[in-house]
Image: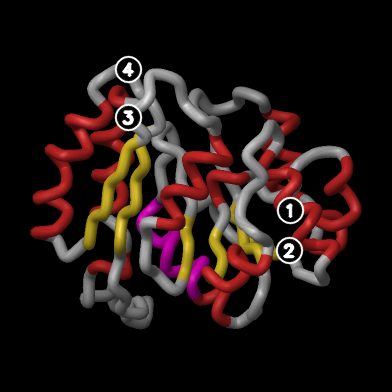
Amino acid sequence: GDMWIDECLEALLCQTVLHAEASSADPAPPACRLELSAYDDGSSDGSWDSLQRWKPRLEAAGVAVVIGRSGGSQGGGCGFAKNRAVAQSSGTWLCFQDVDDLSRPKRIEAQLLAAAARPGALVGARVSREPEGSTARYVAWANEMSEEELLLHRFRECTLLMPTWFMARGTFVRGGGFREEKCEDLLFLHAHVARGGSLHRVGGSPL
């Protein structure tokens, strides 16, 4: 993950919720305190050193930082690492992100507003790919489903792409976290819906 960390965290510093100013056309974004929780699950590159290097810079920008690591040479898997990252965090809301993905400036603002208006929902967003046009059919499917299709297509694939997930901590806790096995995102989504939880994708441009 080391090759992507700088760009990923630079994007975090551009989130509108970190800045009080707004354009003349838009209302001021809701102020909130951000916390980055990162868990290094057995990386063999410079990821841990990069996280430590970024910690003071993020804190100087008003972002709380908590980092942890397994210390093992073999990782425990995606579900394991995500569960540890959530466990060491303290926020009321959880915004998931893979290190090789970028969040656009209004991502947290838009998803926070959507999630606050839909208690208990699992909220996602539209995506774009680089290079543009790669996996075009998959991206079109993920971006163009209706609210009803988010539910109907869930047995085909994870209809809200995991790196775009945003939810209340309570929603995550009620789901018991991720199962620490393959397809942890799809299994969580299925269990969430089975409990009566809703799925929502923020409209408009990719976030």
Q: Which mark is residue 71?
A: 3
Stretch in magenta: 104-112
- Identify residue type, mark 1: Leu
Q: Is residue 20 above or below residue 148?
A: below
Q: Are marks 2 and 1 in contact (CB under 8 Å)?
A: yes
Q: Is residue 161 left or right of residue 106?
A: right
Mark 4 and mark 2: Cα distance apart in space:
36 Å
Of marks 2 and 3, the one in the foreground: 3
Q: Which mark is residue 199?
A: 2
* Residue 125, image x, y percentages: 59, 55
- Identify residue type, mark 2: Leu
Q: Is residue 44 above or below residue 113?
A: above
- Identify residue type, mark 3: Gly
Of marks 2 and 1, the one in the foreground: 1
Quick one: label 4 or label 2, which is nearer the N terminus? 4
Quick one: label 2 or label 1, which is nearer the N terminus? 1
Q: Is residue 42 left or right of residue 117?
A: left
Number of other residues with Cα within 10 Å of mark 4, as a class: few under 14, some 14 to 19, many 20 or more: few
Number of other residues with Cα within 10 Å of mark 3, as a class: few under 14, some 14 to 19, many 20 or more: few
Name the residue: 81% across, 68% down: 195
Provide the residue designation for mark 1: 189
Q: In the orientation shown, which residue stands out farthest toward the front?
A: 72
Mark 1 and mark 4: Cα distance apart in space:
31 Å
Quick one: label 4 or label 3, which is nearer the N terminus? 4
Quarter occupied by the N terminus:
top left
Name the residue: 90% across, 53% down: 152
Provide the residue designation for mark 4: 44
Quick one: label 1 or label 4, which is nearer the N terminus? 4
Q: Toward which corner of the image does residue 28 lie, by quadrant?
A: bottom left
